[in-house]
Image (cartoon, helix red, strand yellow):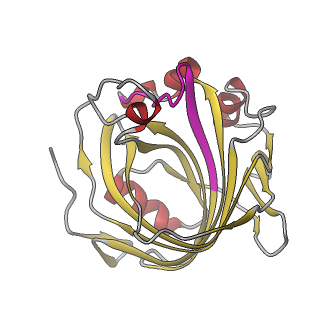
């Protein structure tokens, strides 16, 4: 396995690992989607979607406002799928099928050049530059992704009830695939001010290849399994390593 360097020069600045995010706010929604079409979407990665229930995969849409972190302030939108660890066979039972799952980041537009270069260079995240207007001030949290004034996707999240914070920071493996190389990045999250509910998301798909993929998964008419908002999120990203799939 090849591990990323400890420090990187990004646009004349030195970025040292681990990268820390000290304050971010998030809106997200998770959807059950057909496993076969979802697997087709991420086939280029060599990874396999996790199936909490036979025939069903999980697709997550999330928008993040980064207020304070090592990569500066920016907006980000993510399309991700829950995946099995590379080479792992599915285990029996719901708990077995979800053991060791990670998040494969399929699409990750951002609105700032510095984080674009850092994300692609350090972790192989599929970042691309877009206009990402976001409104987190109202009760309904809203975000859109636009390219040249054309809307790719719009998401609105209705917050739910307060959820107690866990005593330990959850750790997740984030997977990415860029230029034919699949990588794994250990990722730790420390959320507070979390609100969760069933349903509560409205998705409008526009004109973009990823929007067409999501439309093929039924996200333009599906009800979210859960939606969440996070008022304050801290994160730590370790270095990435290449994985064999």
The answer to whether residue 170 is seen in the rendering is: yes
Image coords of residue 33 (percent x, y):
63, 28
Q: Is residue 201 above or below residue 93?
A: below
What residue is rendered at 22% in x and 33% in y?
A: 244
- Quarter occupied by the N terminus: top left
Q: Which residues are magenta?
A: 47-62
What residue is rendered at 47% in x and 66% in y?
A: 115
What residue is rendered at 48% in x and 39% in y?
A: 82
Tell me if 217 is positioned left or right of 178 in this view.
right
Image coords of residue 188 (percent x, y):
39, 64
Image coords of residue 64 (percent x, y):
61, 64
The answer to whether residue 147 is seen in the rendering is: no
Instruction: Using the image as rendered, state which of residue 163 and residue 235 is in the foreground.
Output: 163
Q: Is residue 184 above or below residue 19?
A: above
Tell me if 200 is positioned left or right of 29 in this view.
right
Number of marks present in the image shown: 0
Instruction: Using the image as rendered, state which of residue 11 and residue 19 is in the foreground.
Output: 19
- Quarter occupied by the C terminus: top left
Tell me if 182 is positioned left or right of 160 in this view.
left
Instruction: Using the image as rendered, state which of residue 203 and residue 144 is in the foreground.
Output: 203
Residue 56 painted magenta: yes
Instruction: Using the image as rendered, state which of residue 121 and residue 103 is in the foreground.
Output: 103
Residue 76 figure quarter: bottom right
Q: Is residue 144 above or below residue 183?
A: below
Residue 141 painted magenta: no
What residue is rendered at 68% in x and 48% in y?
A: 226
Image coords of residue 213 (percent x, y):
65, 29
């Amino acid at each position: 396995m090849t591990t990323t360097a400890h420090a990187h020069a990004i646009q004349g600045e030195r970025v040292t690992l681990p990268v820390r995010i000290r304050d971010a706010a998030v809106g997200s929604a998770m959807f059950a989607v057909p496993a076969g079409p979802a697997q087709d979407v991420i086939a280029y990665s060599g990874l396999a979607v996790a199936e909490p229930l036979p025939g069903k995969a999980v697709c997550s849409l999330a928008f993040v406002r980064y207020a304070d972190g090592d990569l500066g302030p920016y907006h980000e939108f993510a399309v991700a799928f829950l995946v099995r660890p590379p080479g792992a066979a599915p285990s029996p039972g719901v708990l077995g099928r979800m053991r060791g799952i990670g998040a494969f980041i399929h699409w990750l537009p951002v609105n700032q050049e510095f984080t674009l270069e850092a994300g692609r260079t350090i972790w192989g995240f599929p970042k691309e530059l877009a206009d990402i207007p976001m409104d987190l001030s109202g009760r309904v949290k809203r975000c859109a992704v636009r390219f040249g004034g054309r809307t790719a996707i719009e998401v609105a999240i209705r917050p739910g009830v307060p959820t107690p914070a866990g005593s330990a920071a959850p750790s997740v493996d984030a997977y990415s695939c860029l230029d034919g190389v699949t990588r794994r990045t250990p990722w730790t999250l420390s959320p507070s001010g979390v609100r969760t509910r069933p349903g509560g998301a409205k998705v409008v798909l526009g004109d973009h290849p990823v929007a067409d993929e999501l439309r093929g998964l039924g996200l333009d008419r599906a009800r979210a399994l859960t939606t969440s908002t996070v008022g304050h999120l801290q994160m730590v990203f370790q270095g990435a390593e290449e994985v064999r799939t």
